[in-house]
Image: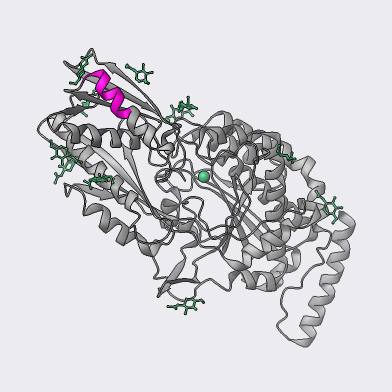
Amino acid sequence: MARIYTEWRCAWFGLILVTLLSGSSFGIPTEDVSTLPKYLQSLEHRIYPDLREISKQIYHHPEIGRNETFAHAITVDYFQNRAPGDWNVYPNILETLPTAWKLESSHKPSHWHGKGNKILPAVGFLCEFDALAGIGHSCGHNLIHLVGVYAASLAREALVHYNIPGRIVVVGTPDEEESCGKHDLFLAGAFEDSQIWMMAHPASSSAVPPLSARQNVVVRIKRATHFEAVKEVYNTLVLLRNLSLTGTLPGSFSTVSLIEDVGLFVCNVVQADIALGVVGANVTVVNNTINAIKAANAGYAQTNFTVTDDPNIKGGVAISFVGNSGHTATDNLGSLTLSVDSFRTLNASNPNLKFYLPDNSTSTELDFTIDLRTRYTLDMDSLIDIVVSLLPTNNWSLDVIYPAVEVEPYLGSLFIDTMTLPEYGNQTFPFSTTPPAAGDTSWVQRADVVKQGGNYTLQSVAKATVHPTFNICNYNRTVTPCPLNHEPGFRLLAATEFAFRETEKVGRALAQMAVELLNDPDVMAGATAIIRTGPDTKF
Ligand SMILES: *[C@@H]1O[C@H](CO)[C@@H](O)[C@H](O)[C@H]1NC(C)=O
Ligand SMILES: *[C@@H]1O[C@H](CO)[C@@H](O)[C@H](O)[C@H]1NC(C)=O
Ligand SMILES: *[C@@H]1O[C@H](CO)[C@@H](O)[C@H](O)[C@H]1NC(C)=O
Ligand SMILES: *[C@@H]1O[C@H](CO)[C@@H](O)[C@H](O)[C@H]1NC(C)=O
Ligand SMILES: *[C@@H]1O[C@H](CO)[C@@H](O)[C@H](O)[C@H]1NC(C)=O
Ligand SMILES: *[C@@H]1O[C@H](CO)[C@@H](O)[C@H](O)[C@H]1NC(C)=O
Ligand SMILES: *[C@@H]1O[C@H](CO)[C@@H](O)[C@H](O)[C@H]1NC(C)=O
Ligand SMILES: *[C@@H]1O[C@H](CO)[C@@H](O)[C@H](O)[C@H]1NC(C)=O
Ligand SMILES: *[C@@H]1O[C@H](CO)[C@@H](O)[C@H](O)[C@H]1NC(C)=O
Ligand SMILES: *[C@@H]1O[C@H](CO)[C@@H](O)[C@H](O)[C@H]1NC(C)=O
Ligand SMILES: *[C@@H]1O[C@H](CO)[C@@H](O)[C@H](O)[C@H]1NC(C)=O
Ligand SMILES: [Zn+2]
C-alpha cells in the first residue's frame, strides 16, 4: 500500500510542475484505479464483519421511526470509539430528530493546499434503520444501514490508499416508514454537504426503479353516538373502496388504501386484524353473509374471520377479521376490505342494523387514514381532490407528501455497469419503470418532472441520487413466491447469510462508484449534469 502511495505522489508533483510552468488551469488528474475492484475486495475481511454485526443487532432490536435510540447509540459508539480509520462523528444533527446522525471524513493530499479554497468534491450515503410496528425489520432497513456505512468505510479507505482528494459523508436518516424523516433533514439543510447521494434497498428483485409518490389523508368523524360514528365511517369506506374498484383513479399505479386508526394503526402496514360488531343480526346470519362474500371472491382466500356472540354488548355479534399484512395496495384483499364488504352487504340487507367496534364501543369520534399512492408527484393533487370529495366531513388533513423518486440514467447506468463486473457477481440489474413502493429519498433528490400530453419527463434534480433495489430472496421462485417488503415473511429474509452476502456486494459496488466519482471529473460531471442550477424554486 505504501509503495503505490509513494509512486503516485511522484506522478502528482510532476503534474504540478507542468501546471505552474504552463500557467494553464489543469483539471484534477484521473488516477489509475484499475485495481480498485480487487482492492475493495481485499478490505472486506477487515471492514465488513463489525458492520454486519451492528446490522444484526439493529435487526434484533427493531425500533419504529423517530425512536431508533438503540440503532443510533450503537452506530455512534462504533464510529466514535471503534471504527478503523478517521471519522468525524456528529451524533446529533437535528434537535427535533434526535436519532439522526452524520459521519464525515475528508482526504486532502498535501498537494491539495495548492488548490486554494476549492471545496473538496463529496459523495454522500444515506442510511435508514427504522422498523415497522408489529412486524420488525420486514422492510430490511437494517441492511440499508449496512450498505451505507460499509460503502462509506470502503470508499474512505480507498481515497487514502490511492491518495484521491475527496470527502465522504454519511447521514443516518430516521423514520423512513411513517412520517418522512428526510423531509425534516432536508429543511435543516442536511443534504447540502454533497451533490451526490447513494443508497440501496433490499427487495425481492433487483432493479433500478422509480418510487411512487405517497400522501395520507387523515379523516376525523365525530357523531352523537358511537353507533352513528361507526356507520358513517363505514359508509365512507364503502365509497372509497368503490373508487378503487371502478378503476377510474387518475395517474398510473394509483391506489387508495384504507387504514382504521384503531388497533395496530400505522400508515405503511396493511392491518392484519380488524374487529367489527353488529347489533340486530344473529351469528348464523352474519356468518353466512361473510362466507358468501368470501366464496364469491378468490382474492379473500388468505383472509379469514370468526363470528361470536359478544358478551359485552346486548344483542351484539362480534366479527374478527384476520388477513395478511403487506404493502398497502388495492390488490391486497385484506381484513379491512373484507369488513367493508361485510358492512355493505349486511347494511343493505337491513337498514336498521347497528354497527360498533368491539374493542371500544364508547368512542364517538372515529378516525381513519386514506393512504394515496401514484407514480408521479404531479398526479397527487387530482387524486386527493377525488378522495376528499367523497368525505362526509371537512375535518381532514394531509401529512407530509413523499414525492416520487425518479430514475437518473447516468448514476443508474453506472450502478448497473458496476454490478456486471465479476467482483460483484456478474449481476444483471435492469432499469425498471414499475414503482415497487414509495420512499422519502425524494426529499433528497427533489426531482422536477414536466408533463406534456401523456408524457412525463425528468427535467432536473436538486441532488443526484441512486436508489437501486437488490434481491435478497434465495428461494426457488418458481416453487415458492418470495415475500414482498412489508410482509411478515420478508423479515426472515433480512438477516439471512444470503442477504448479508448480497448486501456486501452492493455496498462495495457503491464504494467503487464513489471513488470513481471523486477520482474522475468526467464521471462527476456526468452524474451531476442533471442537477439544476440557479435558485432552487422547485418544491
Ligand atoms: C422505543 O425504543 C425503546 C428501546 O429501543 C423501547 O423500549 C420503547 O418501547 C420504544 N418506544 C416505542 C414507542 O416504540
Ligand atoms: C359500491 O359498489 C358495489 C359493487 O359494485 C355496488 O353494489 C354499490 O352500489 C356501490 N355503492 C356505492 C355507495 O357506490
Ligand atoms: C337467525 O336469524 C334468522 C333470520 O332472522 C332466523 O331465521 C334464524 O332462526 C336465527 N337463528 C338463530 C339461531 O337464532
Ligand atoms: C361459520 O361458518 C363456517 C363455515 O360454514 C363454519 O365452519 C363455522 O362453524 C360457522 N361459525 C359459526 C359461529 O356458526
Ligand atoms: C386463512 O385460511 C387459509 C385457509 O385455511 C390459510 O391458508 C391462511 O393462512 C389463513 N390466513 C391467515 C391470515 O391466517
Ligand atoms: C347503509 O344504510 C343506511 C341506512 O341505515 C343508508 O343510508 C346507507 O346509504 C347505507 N350504506 C351504504 C354504503 O349503502
Ligand atoms: C375508547 O375510546 C375513548 C375515546 O377515544 C378513550 O377515551 C378510551 O380510553 C377508549 N377505551 C379503551 C378501552 O380503549
Ligand atoms: C376536527 O377534529 C379534531 C380532533 O378531534 C378536533 O379537535 C377539531 O375540533 C375538529 N374540527 C372541526 C372543525 O370539527
Ligand atoms: C463472472 O464471470 C467470470 C468470467 O466472465 C467468471 O469467471 C466468474 O466465475 C463469474 N462469477 C460469477 C459469480 O458468476
Ligand atoms: C409522447 O412521447 C412519444 C414518444 O416519444 C411521442 O411520440 C409523443 O408525441 C409524445 N406526446 C406528447 C403529447 O408530447
Ligand atoms: C426450481 O424448481 C423447478 C420446479 O421444481 C425446477 O425445475 C428447477 O430446476 C428449480 N431451479 C433451481 C435453481 O433449483
Ligand atoms: Zn423500506
Q: Residue at x 24, y 46 (%)?
A: 239
Does the stretch in magenta take in 443?
Answer: no
Q: Residue at x 71, y 77 (%)?
A: 27
User: Residue 336: x and y, percent?
Assistant: 34, 35
Q: Which residues are magenta?
A: 282-290
User: Residue 159: x and y, percent?
Assistant: 74, 58
**Count of number-bearing discs:** 0
Residue 230 seen in the current view: no
Q: Is residue 121 left or right of residue 98?
A: right
- Give the overall secondary structure of the magenta segment: helix
Asked if 66 appears above or below 442 in the picture, the reply is above
Colouring chosen for the image of the structure: one colour
Q: Is residue 451 left or right of residue 52?
A: left
Q: Is residue 486 left or right of residue 109?
A: left
User: Residue 476: x and y, percent?
Assistant: 68, 39
Residue 398 seen in the current view: yes
Q: Residue at x 68, y 60 (%)?
A: 416
Specify the quadrant that holds the C terminus. bottom left
Compare residues 531 and 214 and report the one nearer the observer.
Answer: 214
User: Residue 157: x and y, percent?
Assistant: 74, 52
Q: Residue at x 39, y 55 (%)?
A: 254
Q: Is residue 6 left or right of residue 228?
A: right
